[in-house]
Image (spheres, helix red, strand yellow):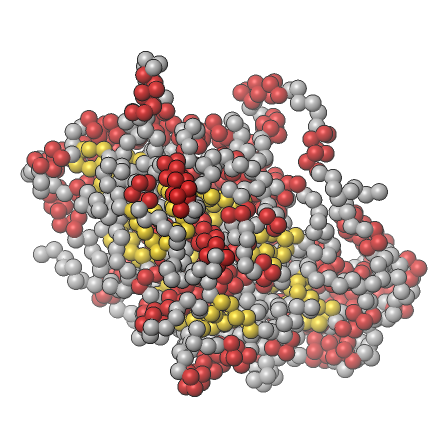
Amino acid sequence: MSLSRHINADEVIEKSKEHPHRKHTAQEGRQTFHQSWSRDEDAARAPKYTIPEVGIPSKAAYQLLHDETALDGNPLLNLASFVHTWMPPEANQLIMENINKNQVDLDEYPAATIIHNRCISMLADLWKAPKDTKAIGTSTAGSSEAIMLGGLALKKKWQEARKAAGKDHYHPNIVFGSNAQVALEKFARYWDVEARLVPVNASTNYVMNPHDAIPFIDENTIGVMVILGSTYTGHFEDVQLMSDLLDDLEKRTGLDIPIHVDGASGAFVAPFAYPNYKWAFDVKRVHSINTSGHKFGLVYAGLGWILWKDESMLHKDLIFELHYLGSVEYSFTLNFSKPAAPIIAQMYNFLNLGFDGYRRIAIKDLRNARMLSRALEATYFKVLSNIHKPSKNQAVTDNDDSDDPELYERGLPVVSFKLSDKFIADYPHVQQAWIQSMLRTKGWIAPNYNAPEGEAETEMLRIVVRETLSEDLCERLIVDILEITEALMGTSMYSRSTFVDPSSPTHAAGVATATSLPHSSAFSRVPSHSAYARPDDVVGEGSALAIPSSLVAPIAFNPPYAPSESSSSSSVPNSPLLSFPQSLPVAALHQQTLPARVTHTLLLPFSFLFHMFTAFFFLTSLHLPFSFFSSPSRPSQSGSAVMLSKTLHQPDKDHGRPEKANFGDGDNEGGVSQSGFARQC
Amino acid sequence: MALSKHVNADHLLQQSRDKKSPSHFANLTQSGPHAPLSHSYGARYGTDPIPKYHIPSKGLDPQSAYQLIHDELTLDGAPLLNLASFVHTYMHPAGVKLMEENLTKNLIDTDEYPATQIIHNRCISILADLWHAPSTQNAIGTATTGSSEAIQLGGLAMKRIWQEKRKAAGKSIHEPGPNIIMGANAQVALEKMARYFDVECRLVPISVESNYRLDPKKAMEYVDENTIGVFVILGSTYTGHYEPVKEMSDLLDEYEAKTGHSVPIHVDGASGGFFAPFATPKLLWDFQIPRVVSINTSGHKFGLAYVGVGWVIWRDKQHLPKDLIFELHYLGSVEYSFSLNFSRPAAPIIAQYFNLISLGFEGYRTIALNDLKNARLLSRALENSKYYTVLSDIHRLDSERSLGASVKATINENDVESYVAGLPVVSFRFSDDLQQKYPEIQQKWIQTLLRSRGWIVPNYELAPNLEKVEILRVVVRENMSELLIERLVNDLIEITEDLIKRDSPMHALDALGTAQSKKHHERAHGQIDEGHVSSSSGTYAKTC
């Protein structure tokens, strides 16, 4: 029997310890140690939940924490988050030099303040603030704070207008799509503003359709928050259309509704990737825009920005005047003391990259995202994000530069995908959430979540293609996803049908999309890979990506859970797992010498077994039922916790965590729970 | 003639530059986009102006960009000599290294960084234990970016509980609206909370008798059924005095017995929360008092971490209304969040935990006692000089306690318990004697003159009602060693005596002190116009 879930690991550990008779000798030992690892003795005695009576040496404390934080994931492989995780060494140096500076201490650190103000100016310019207005803004800890400040300014403006008109000013509401990040709802809840969620669904591309928003607006609406870059699928909401519709509304009803653009991710992508796109202060109704410096601003966590088009949009009451030695500064923030280092790092990026550098990174991100999208769409998945779809507006063929993002639909470099309908029909037992957990065992973090309200039964996997996800890593990721998916197919209790049917319309269409684009970079960029490099050769052949079986045969794929089928080579040539890597430099198996190929062939099943075993062991250690893999039914999963049990008792993790049942009373308990990865950063 | 105030420096520079040649080859040091970028100062911005107010179209190589910003930042002051701020500026190199290693981590991403999350939770437990929460298992709290966020969360929770209560009683939550009570010496964050969350801010005036801080008896005059709570400040930023939490609580107990309205207390321990438990463990101010529902503190003040970490803890979950808590689903686990910021750096939290375990109770206590000892030294030196009157009290013997101590016949000068409890802050002003003799000497000159020697010691007015009194304030932090105190006292005395000599050229600074350019060209850029802001509450309670 596996471990019962009621076992308390802390108790087990306590019982397993040797009798602590050495307590006092250890105490003495501490005075004299010189070499490094005697420290472990001290570290072992550090109480976890109270402050130690006597501290341990700095080195020991360092080592203890250094080792413990090694359990954290690798930021590079975190595809779940928009938050940037890499900066050049020079930037790191600059950050460490300034790590003890406090941004709010204007008088002591005047240079940091000047740099801050220059960042604001640069952003105002980037976001096309009209020359005749006085743009004003501030740095924040992140987009959450920025959104709250933006919302608060809208609320105050509305309140004052209502007070002046002698009307009730206690029941404001705000309108945004249900795909909004949690910060928007937080603003509404904390500031007693009714949140009116505009439902989204597949037909609106999982973002707010401005037409749908209009019915939610009334005289108590303080504003509309338009999201530039939905966290679900990366789609941009149409700021210009929203503004036009609100103009129309004003004509009909006299309501003057402002727009706040949540450009947490998009405001650092759109200006560079789509310089001519109208979404910023050049749209009339846009009052304020926020963004995260730590997302596509390419700075480490801890920096956001908000700008207002004109200082008249900020009510007096919200601004505090600060007197510093000989000068007066103004502040509108929720935080006071905060590190100056991220702001300095932002300026470093502005100078180091320039417009050109940011643009190159944006283009590269989008190109990699397109490659990933096409590869997924050509196989077992349906891609919900749109950046790989050719733009409807422009003639694709005329332009030589296939990298130009304007040739495709606009969006963030985000790939959201789910298992294709065909796959689900063929392999009903495979749960999409498993892919997330299996990817984790290979080091990748790619979350599987429910789509926003209105379409909540749809689950999607999401990958954010950041600067650090190079083409090379992107290719590894594709291989891993396909490997995992096929391994899961192999877990079927039913006979395995040939999934990839060349004549199948979906598949053919997918391949055609992937290859018929004149400059399908994913494939054409690898000229050494003969047949697959030249789209011309491929288009029109049903099974475009399949490779000659002579090359494939030696590396026949052995699904560990279906040994009886391991030698059935008939199904192999059409398997995307085998065909796909062939077009990728990292998996250039057919260039290997025969012995190498044989070795590979021999090892592949084992390495696979190892992965599966690891995963399996991992799962069972988490007290999941053993029937897991053989379960033929597809149980309905409402939440995201599929592979990992929610009831899991992890004493260390649970300690200090609240229990929901004990929270103080509130009036809308039901509405609190929010799933979905819009909740992510 | 001296430069007129009205010269626009930007304009001046523009006129003084070489005329741009139309040829692109004229500027030899200008590196084209593909030119080899070899040495920092030879790069484009060595001789060209960097575009200050828009993003440059082409970037700059990393080394040059680094050097450019690095050099500009040398104009910032030295954090060590900043005696104006409570914010800590030194960490052990091991702690710094740990921060550097974890620079890229995002605290909110609990699934990706589970170890960091566990460390965060342990910090909460440690603080709850330190502040005597009835059960560390039931206490609940969160890290914040600083005390401002923490205070706003504390206030918001109290507001929501009041709202629920009113709603349950069928009363209006709008007319009259909620109010909150605090001393006029409150830091700007407290007023911010009131203004941003539409809570009426009732400031209790301070006086010399109330030791420049909240007078609980006076505060009671402001309490009514719509009071969501009282902010009690542990460690006034003006003079370092602790506000009497216990007395306030007792008075509110009486009030509740009389009227049935239970008014909770939030303790703003921005500085004191990490100081009082170590320096004066017997002082009653924390969760031992049942009326204290929440406490906040700044990890980056006497928590000895670098800027960017604050904490707020509620005594138990009942005081944190459910609908303020957002449930976050991460891969396989559920986390709860109550914060105004979302993504935030994990490094400061790791630094905090590093301090907690590497210093331990003993380490924090040693530092606290050292700080107080040095502060007493400074206070006595200033008082003995006769030029200054010291407003803070930590160097004075506590009359109540010394009575008890007199039974023991002697008072131990080294025993911190013999003195009035407070933060290691020294607030002082010119003595009445000096003011009478030399009415023309302005106290704010001292600030400017100290600055020229490297020290930052601010000169500010006290809070409303006492705003005519100007004080100088020195925060004695860990890195303010006895040696530095000696240097500071020397410099102060020297400067003061120099001013007393009437023929001193330093009188020329008269102009300097008053006319520090408001229209400083670059600082003015990006600043909002005067008059577009709410009225000044200008004091250094506003500093961190």
> Is residue A556 shown above or below B71?
below
Which corner quadrant holds the N terminus of chain B? bottom left
Q: How many marks?
A: 0
Which picture quadrant has residue B529?
bottom left
Quarter-of-image position of residue A85: bottom right
B228 lies left or right of B203? right
Image position, residue B171 (x, y; %): 44, 60
Q: Depth check: A47 or A637 in front? A: A637
Q: Is residue A668 left or right of residue A565?
A: left
Which residue occupies the foreground of this view, A408 or B350? B350
Q: Residue furthest right?
A: A564
Looking at the image, the residue that sits furthest to the left is B503
The picture places residue A583, in percent across and down from the top left corner, at 73, 68
In the rendered image, the vertical position of residue B131 relative to residue B102, given as above or below = above
Position above or below: B208 against B378: below
**Viewer can see residue B475:** no
* Relative image position of residue B401 (x, y in whole percent): 34, 23
Q: Residue at x 50, y 74 (%)?
A: A274
Q: Residue furthest top?
A: B409
Q: Is residue B371 visible?
A: yes
Nearest the eye: B445 or B293: B293
Residue drawn where x is 56% and y is 37% of the image: B135
Q: Position of residue B112 (x, y in %)?
A: 62, 52
Q: Is residue A262 left or right of residue A526?
A: left
Q: Is residue A263 left or right of residue A632?
A: left
Q: Residue at x 68, y 54 (%)?
A: B332
Res A44 → quadrant: top right
Residue lying at 52% horizontally and 63% vertically, measured from the top left: A185
